[in-house]
Image (cartoon, rainbow, N blue to C red):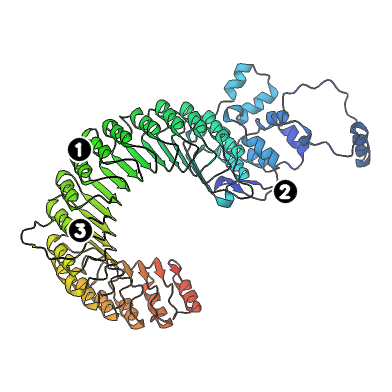
Amino acid sequence: MPTLVNYGGGGGDEFYSGASFCPNPLDLARFCSVDVYYPPQKRARLLSSPYEYDACIKHDHGSSQRPSIEALPDECLFEIFRRIPAGRDRSSTASVSKHWLFLLASLRKAETFNGKKALAADHVEQPEDEMKISSVSTDDEEDGYLTRCLQDKKATDVRLAAVAVGTSTRGGLAKLSIRGNNSYRGVTDRGLSCIARACPSLKALSLWSISSISDEGLFEVARECRSLEKLDLCRCPCLSSKGLIAIAKHCPNLTALSIESCSMIGNEGLEAIGRFCPRLQSVSIKDCPLVGDRGAVSLVSSAPSVLSKIRLQGLNITDFSLAVIGHYGQAVTSLVLSGLKNVTEKGFWVMGNAQGLKRLASLTIISCGLTDVGLEVLGNGCPNLKQVCLQRCYFISDNGLLDFVRAAGSLESLQLMELNRVSQVGVIGVLSNCGARLKTLALSECMGVKDFPVAVPDLSSCQSLRCLSIQNCPGFGNAGVALVGKLCPNLHHLEFTGLWGIKDAALLPLLESCEDGLVKVNLSDCPNVTDEAISALVMIHGGTLQMLNIDGCRKVTDASLEAIADNCLLINDLDLSKCAVTDAGISVLSSAEQINLRVLSLSGCSQVTNKSVPFLKRLGGSLVGLNLQHCCSISSASVELLAESLWRCDILY
């Protein structure tokens, strides 16, 4: 028996091995009668035995095969199937064979009958207009609220057909996501066509890494799913601008479009979207070599009053596109420009001076030709800019950064990544010139940040800064930590990751200067941090500390655990990976009555053995996550016993 369709409470696209509701095909034919004309016939005489019946069949038809509904052409089966009541009956019929499954899946909602009207159609001859009225679907079926996601091996035409049959009468399918493809029986245009015909209520379609779907599939979606609002295409090499043009012409309600790594989609498709989709609110175009200024300009200028999110990455666009964004971006609140090798300082200068980005709140620029001049102009031209991320903009220096901070009056979050011309002077300048606005500052892999003496008394402190993150900046050391401690007295979140140069002596003044109390602290991969700094941290901020990560601090021992057990009242996330803690420290930690850990990581703690299992059980009353990976002194049997006791906790081993 082929794969069957399950009609259960969990959803309409599951498979089961139950029998058909009509074992005898002849009974199904009588159950679903069709208004088909038959010439007058004599009454069939009753046969006295099965042997006589077989002989008659062989005599009449010249073969020994029994009569079967499968002998009917698809046109007749279509008329039968469209009269089957929705729900269990239709699902059971689809389970008979793949042939029937695809026939049922190809039925449009407008072509099916409701149960009572179908019975009336079987016994009463209706006019053509009346037949059209009876075939209209109910409002509930058109709403669309169900969501289905098929990934990898589950992404086949058969399963798509099952989804079409199972969801068509249960409120309608609203969102469909297909990720990956079955290498043997992958998704094709046939499966997508089934979804389009059976689920006209589809509002969101996402196709990722599918090489077997062509424009024909999008044509069918465009014809049937007029309510489509979101389209996401990623790594679909057989889709071209023709399919996108069809979507544009038939789906005017499209509000979100995302296209990534589709080598055959170019300017023509985007021009059609710009012309026929006036409600477009979000656009993301990434790594499409055929997209240039024509396509980008059409999208941006088509709906200037509603388009709020733009992402352009890896495209062959020039300064002209940036100028259009600056002029027509009246509604743009989020802008991402990445990997645009043909844009220069001139484009950013025009974009900022166009004065069209008044509502821009979030700006991300990665690997573009942004310079100090362009950055300052953007600060002046975007008065509501709150979040800025600059990555691999190699022409940005301390001067441009300081000018930008002074110009951007609403800046709240600044993220600097791989800006090698930015030094410690620029970082200190940002902190002392942002006034009472900046709340988050993050630096990552900025190789130009190095320690040097700075006269602090003349600098203003950053009272508003709550979050400070410095990751993998090897030149940032004790002097930098001391400066930060004096300039940032109100920190809540502190993250120093991969800073080999900082020591306890520099951390202590910073910890003492944080007046409001630290909530989250991450000191991972800082090998020179010892028990002295951790003990001071928990003694000063134990009343507010909720998360502590000291992964890779190999000089931290049980003394820190004793301090945590005595002082931390609210801590719920503790990472001790690769620390020098032992069973004794775990015992002390488990004895603290006020501690209610939710997540505990002991990965790579070689001195934690089977003796800690009872202590971990004691902690397990509140644990939901426990990491014991690379704990070579804890046996598998002990972990199994622990898992039986901590059945609510996810244990990694």
Q: Nearer the viewer, mark 2 or mark 1?
A: 1
Residue under pointer 3: 423
Q: Is residue 114 above or below residue 405?
A: above
> Between marks 1 and 3, how big is the CA–CA gap?
26 Å
Q: Position of residue 577 (x, y in %)?
A: 36, 72
Query: Residue sitting at 48 percent across and 36 percent down?
Result: 265
Comparing 544 with 595, the one in front is 544
Looking at the image, tell me whether mark 1 or mark 3 is earlier in sequence order: 1
| Observer able to see residue 311 | yes
CA distance separating discs 2 and 1 = 67 Å
Horizontal side of residue 587 vs 219, given as left or right: left
Secondary-structure class at tag 3: loop
Q: Can you tell which of label 2 and label 3 is closer to the viewer? A: 3
The quadrant holding residue 585 is: bottom left
**Which label sits in the foreground, 1 or 3?**
3
| Disc number placed over residue 1 in the picture, else none | 2
Q: Which residue is mark 1?
A: 381
How dense is the environment of label 2, judged by Cα within 10 Å: few (below 14), some, or many (20 and up)? few
Q: Are marks 1 and 3 in contact (CB under 8 Å)?
A: no
Instruction: Report, in whole angstroms, how far the alpha carbon at label 2 lies from the one at label 3.
Output: 70 Å
> Which residue is pictured at 70% across the width and 42% down the height?
97
Q: Is residue 180 above or below residue 37?
A: below
Q: Quadrant of residue 421?
A: bottom left
* Residue 331 in view: no
The x and y percentages for residue 85 are: 63, 34
Q: Which mark is residue 89?
A: none
**Left or right: where 107 falls relative to 553:** right
